[in-house]
Amino acid sequence: MSQCFSAAAPETQVSSRTAEPETAVAVRARAHTADAAAGLPSMPESGEARDFDFLHGEWLVENRRLADPLDAASEWIVFDSAHSCRPLIGSAGHIEEITSDNGVTGAVLRLFDARSRRWAIHRISPGDGTLRPAMHGGFDGGVGLFVGDEAWQGRPVLLRETWTEPRRPHWERAFSTDGGRTWLTYWVRDFIRVDWQ
């Protein structure tokens, strides 16, 4: 694990390993994505407003990301980030703020729709403050699965995020270029709870 907030940019900390095989989390998540082409995971509408309560607080996060998200043979970039997550008034969702160890910042807004019992996840573009298109989904059997439309270098793709292990959260992000039939996991995060005070 690199030291958080080190002077080196994440892009300079490149692993010499080749792409890793699909993880067990991705295999379990794939089983829930029969409706991925429609943009939503296939799972019961059984979400709760407290599904993401495990994420509230402060975290040191170990990141591994493929240099090219659409090339499984590209190298893995390894870096740390600090995350702070706090609930919104009324428990309708929360906001997560992120700072990477090279100073790059970001934010994620997660909102729970009590009528559909599904979550909407919006990434906030740090440059202009706009919300990216939402991913939608929820939790089933301890696995959180969220899917949405995205574009990568002008190419339309499906984006999937998967959450497991609430006590030490594990997050994966994957792209699909074939409507959800196959997925390439290109970013993995492991969360370690901290107290910066």
Image (tube, rainbow, N blue to C red):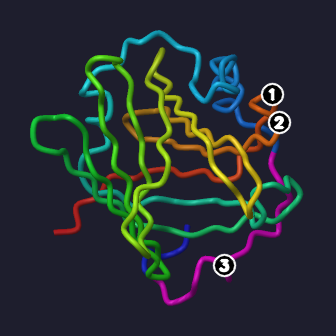
- Which mark is drawn over residue 15? none
Identify which residue is drawn at 58% across, 23% down.
Answer: 41
- Can you say whether 75 is above or below 157 in the image? below
Please provide percent x and percent y for residue 16. Answer: 82, 69
Q: Which residue is mark 3?
A: 11
Considering the numbered disc 1 on the image, is that residue within a helix, a strand or a loop? loop
Q: Residue at x 30, y 26 (%)?
A: 113
For the residues labelled 2 and 1, the Cα–Cα distance comes to 6 Å
**In the image, which disc is placed on residue 178?**
2
- Name the chief secondary structure element in magenta: loop
Residue 181's disc is: 1
Chain part drawn in magenta: 6-20
Q: Which secondary structure, mark 2?
A: loop
* Amino acid of disc 2: Asp
The answer to whether marks 2 and 1 mark residues whose Cβ atoms lie closer than 8 Å is yes
Residue 63: percent from left, percent from top = 56, 60
Q: x, y percentage for residue 114?
A: 26, 21
Q: Is residue 132 magenta?
A: no
Q: CA distance from mark 2 to mark 3?
A: 28 Å
Q: Is residue 11 above or below residue 73?
A: below
Q: Is residue 9 magenta?
A: yes
Query: Type of residue at label 1?
Result: Arg
Neighbours of disc 1 within 10 Å: few (<14), some (14-19), many (20+): few
- Residue 24, placed above or below residue 102: above
